[in-house]
Amino acid sequence: MKQLVLVTGGTGYIGSHTAVELQQSGYDVVIVDNLSNSNIEVLDGIEKITGIRPAFEQFDLCDTDKVTSFFKSYSGLQAIIHFAAFKAVGESVEKPLMYYRNNLVSLMNLLQHMDQYQVPHLVFSSSCTVYGQPEELPVTEKAPILPAESPYGNTKQISEEIIRDTLKARPNLHSIALRYFNPIGAHPSALIGELPRGIPNNLVPFVTQTAAGLREELKVFGNDYPTPDGSAIRDYINVVDLARAHVVAIEHMLNNKQHRNFEFFNLGTGKGTSVLEIVKTFEKVTGVPLKYRIVGRRSGDIIQVWADTRLANEELGWKAERSLEETLLSAWNWEKHLRNITD
Ligand code: UFG
């Protein structure tokens, strides 16, 4: 019999790609999403790619009664992948309580019900934001956790602590926190991808929207950083590679390969890329010239970060495989699909 996995936030960007990879690996998927930052049509994309429409329940995970009804009706759950959370850094500074309530209450509701309904495995979406600006690069999982720069970042740190403390008291539960670096790109089919609401905060959606003519120009935030070309450096990881890591993490737990009942892994490529390199690579692979202007640094940005991925390579047997070129092309193909742009 197929194993059933709950994907919270499964109509979102990383969640939808993970639902595809799970179904293609033989898992049954049930998605819970309140659609606060995603569209129901994403289910059509998942169905077109995999031939299977995942089960879908629309409700808010902060609503404890609804969570209880859900766990009662889906008794065969084997594992949970918890993506559902607010994630805009700037908005979290404006509305901290909204972020703390949404991101923490939903997690606590899930943990409580996992315990009550004997669902032993949880994969949690964490972020490299927990490291702040690391002193040593590439950053390993042993690097110190620095005070968070934003309420959003703090919810990731606190969530990891909540899981750690809960699992100490409940050794029958298992969890893996995956610390993402910068996920970009879209499914190669161009049937699912990132759907930012309003003006994108993140670099690659801003790049593709500028290329599509929706934005006047890209602002490059700073060219006076102590980096080779002066622009800031991140570790950009293909979203399908990232989605695959969730399937591998589930298998790691289902096959009892965990060394401890709470593990965490960096998910990146191990390679840093500057903002200006993203611009140049995008222009090269798409043939579309990009209008951009250098402006001042964005407040709260770190200078540079990239992952040491050895732990995920060795313990999970996972490695990012897709190149930056194909990833940026997939982001552009998705933008073209959204805007009905033909070559
Ligand atoms: N950038 C620009 N112009 C833009 C947008 C971004 O130059 O219009 C630059 C940023 O200054 C940064 C780089 O592109 O140097 C990447 O910026 P993103 O906003 O795409 O990503 P961040 O690394 O700032 O943010 C990511 C996640 C957050 C997380 C943060 C932790 O999106 O969720 O890492 O560092 F909190």
Image: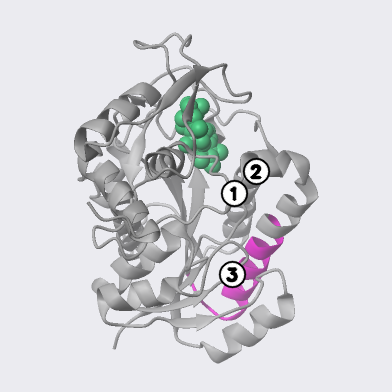
Q: Which mark is residue 152?
A: 2
- Judged from the image, the secondary structure of the residue bearing numbered disc 2 is helix
Q: Cβ–Cβ below 8 Å for labels 1 and 2?
A: yes
| Rendered location of residue 179, percent (x, y) | 45, 44
For badge 1, the amino acid type reads Lys
Mark toward the start of the polypeptide (1 vs 2): 1
Between tags 2 and 3, which lies in front?
3
- Judged from the image, the secondary structure of the residue bearing numbered disc 1 is loop
Q: Quadrant of residue 245?
A: bottom left
Q: Cβ–Cβ below 8 Å for labels 2 and 3?
A: no
For ligand 1, tell me if the residue under mark 2 lies within 8 Å.
yes
CA distance for labels 2 and 3: 19 Å
- Judged from the image, the secondary structure of the residue bearing numbered disc 3 is loop
CA distance for labels 1 and 2: 6 Å
Residue 192: in magenta span: no
Residue stretch in magenta: 104-120
| Rendered location of residue 125, percent (x, y) | 49, 53
Q: Residue at x 57, y 16 (%)?
A: 296
Q: Which mark is residue 35?
A: 3
Residue 339's place in the image compared with 23, above or below, is: above
For badge 2, the amino acid type reads Tyr
Mark toward the start of the polypeptide (2 vs 3): 3
Q: Residue at x 22, y 36 (%)?
A: 287
Q: Is residue 286 left or right of residue 147?
A: left
For ligand 1, tell me if the residue under mark 3 lies within 8 Å.
no
* Residue for badge 1: 87
For ligand 1, tell me if the residue under mark 1 lies within 8 Å.
yes
The one nearer the camera, 127 or 163, is 127
The one nearer the camera, 325 or 109, is 325
The answer, for residue 215, to whether it is visible in the render is yes
For badge 3, the amino acid type reads Leu
